[in-house]
Image: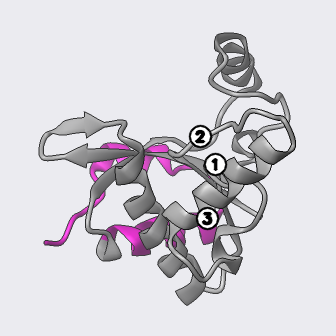
Amino acid sequence: MTFKLSSRSLRRLEGVDTELVSVVKRAIDLTAIDFGVSEGLRTLSRQKELVEKGASQTLKSKHLEGSAVDLVAYIGPRVSWELKVYDDVADAMRQAAKELQVTLRWGAAWHKNLTDSEGSAESLMNEYIDLRRSQGRRPFIDAPHFELA
């Protein structure tokens, strides 16, 4: 099955780095899971709001410079927040980024670039979780987030 970005998703890519836009557009052709763009370029006030809510951990987000996107997965007509669905989206984003020679980081595996990994996105995320736990730290999983590295 092939999917297509909605006009709303395309509008949300305005102001985002052209390389990242190209990756998202290629990934929608490759993905087994439908997705849309929930956020691209952000204002500082929006970023502060997300930090206050605990949805972000930094005021130095790559969203502020148009170097990050948040994607939302769909199962049929409904939004899904199941982690396993985002692994599949991340696999499509990695494949697209590698094809386009763009270095990408994923918010569920902060320790290593998504495009430097040969295994599945799921295994990369598990590696990050294990690393953080071995350091006595909680992992910060932001699976919808993708950014230029």
* Of callouts 1 and 2, the N-terminal one: 1
Q: Secondary structure at mark 2?
A: loop
Residue type at the position of mark 3:
Leu
Provide residue 3's location: percent of width, then percent of height. 21, 65
Q: Residue at x 44, y 58 (%)?
A: 87
Provide residue 145's location: percent of width, then percent of height. 58, 47
Residue 20 placement, left or right of 66: left
Residue type at the position of mark 2:
Asp
Q: What is the distance, in whole Å, between disc 3 and disc 2 at their CAs? A: 13 Å
Q: Is residue 18 above or below residue 67?
A: below
**Residue at which label 2 appears:** 142
The segment highlighted magenta reads 1-28
Q: Residue at x 75, y 17 (%)?
A: 48
Disc number for residue 11 = none
Q: Residues within 10 Å of mark 2 (few under 14, many from 20)?
A: some
Residue type at the position of mark 1:
Gly
Q: Can residue 15 be spotted in the picture?
A: no
Q: Is residue 33 above or below residue 118?
A: above
**Residue at which label 1 appears:** 107
Q: Is residue 126 above or below residue 21?
A: above
Quarter where residue 26 is shown: bottom left
Q: Is residue 149 above or below residue 141?
A: below
Q: Residues within 10 Å of mark 3 (few under 14, many from 20)?
A: many
Q: Secondary structure at mark 3?
A: helix
Q: What is the distance, in whole Å, between disc 3 and disc 1 at their CAs? A: 11 Å
**Residue at which label 3 appears:** 124
Q: What is the distance, in whole Å, between disc 1 and disc 2 at their CAs? A: 5 Å
Q: Which quadrant of the figure contains the C terminus?
A: bottom right
Q: Nearer the viewer, residue 49 or 139?
A: 139
